Amino acid sequence: MPAEPMIPDPLEMLSLERTHDLSGLSIRTLHKLRTSGRLKSYRVGERVLIRRVDFEAFLAECAEPGRQGGCK
């Protein structure tokens, strides 16, 4: 029986460090994106968390055709 495709969990949360590991963006850049409001994030105590779907939407926006130089 073939394996069922994985459905991403819309509530999966990523730490800044995990987001950095997945994307290669520096922690400083992630902080700038967060504080400018371009990347939605949540603070839980001292932890900063980013929903995976929000991060993927941000990346998709940067990759839109006709957008020169990606996101800055």
Image: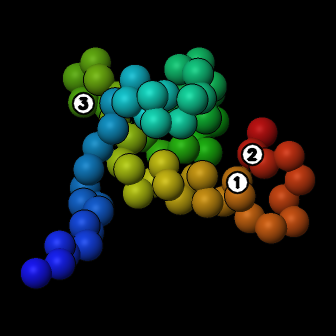
Q: Which residue is mark 3?
A: 44
**Inter-mark Cα distance, 2 to 3:** 27 Å
The residue that appears at 61% across and 35% down in the rendered structure is: 33
Whether 43 is drawn above or below 54: the answer is above
Say few, some or many: other residues with alpha carbon within 10 Å of mark 3 (under 14 / 14 to 19 / 20 or more): few
Q: Which residue is mark 2?
A: 71
Give 25 or 47, whichever is nearer the viewer: 25
Do the CB atoms of the residues marked 1 and 3 lie less than 8 Å apart?
A: no
Q: Is residue 67 left or right of residue 49?
A: right
Do the CB atoms of the residues marked 1 and 2 lie less than 8 Å apart?
A: yes
Q: Which residue is mark 1?
A: 62
Give coordinates of residue 17: x percent, y percent. Answer: 40, 23
Q: Which structural element holds mark 1? A: helix
Whether 43 is drawn above or below 58: the answer is above
Does label 1 or label 3 sit earlier along the sequence? 3
Does label 2 or label 3 sit earlier along the sequence? 3
Query: Within the image, what quadrant is residue 1 found in?
Result: bottom left
The residue type indicated by label 2 comes to Cys
The residue type indicated by label 1 comes to Cys
**Which quadrant would the C terminus be assigned to in this image?**
top right
